[in-house]
Amino acid sequence: MGSEDAGNVAEVARANEARGIVVGLPLSLDGSHGPAARKVTAFCGRLRKETDLPVYTCDERMTTVEAHSLLKDAGKSPSRARGVARGEIDSASAAIILDIYIQSN
């Protein structure tokens, strides 16, 4: 997650006339900020420098587990996800994160 990535995200948000950007924050199970969460927090700082849009973080704990469950219920087999299947899990997780954010506001 470098500055180029932040610029790309900001550009996609502008192109799609977004009103804000929601980023999943990978907190540890106990709610603490481990290395992954610190990396995302730094990325959000770079993203805020690239855009005037508000950047929100959303706790993403357990979203991958929920995505696996939803895909399995839909007849997919995400347990050995690689390539395209991994993209499906990531997309489902992103949708869950966005839903969590929307429900909380």
Image (tube, rainbow, N blue to C red):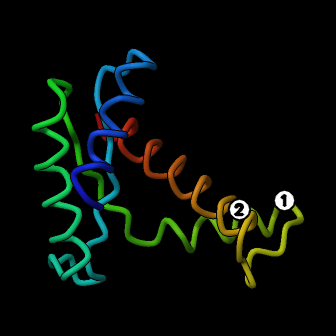
Residue drawn 26% across the image and 81% down it: 28
Q: Quadrant of the C terminus?
A: top left
The answer to whether residue 101 is above or below residue 14 is below
Which residue, given by chain and number where applicable, does mark 1 sit on? 74
Check disc 2 and report its element: helix, strand or loop. helix
Q: In this view, does 105 lie to the left or right of 54?
A: right
The answer to which image quadrant residue 82 occupies is bottom right
| Residues at marks 1 and 2 touching, judged by CB atoms closer than 8 Å | yes
Residue drawn 37% across the image and 21% down it: 18
Q: In this view, does 85 lie to the left or right of 86?
A: right
Residue reaching furthest to the front:
4
The answer to whether residue 57 is above or below residue 83 is above
The answer to which image quadrant residue 26 occupies is bottom left
Residue drawn 89% across the image and 65% down it: 75
The amino acid type, in three-letter code, at marker 2 is Leu
Mark 1 vs mark 2, CA separation in Å: 6 Å
Q: Residue 31, position in %: x, y? A: 20, 76
Q: Quadrant of the N terminus?
A: bottom left
Which residue, given by chain and number where applicable, does mark 2 sit on? 70
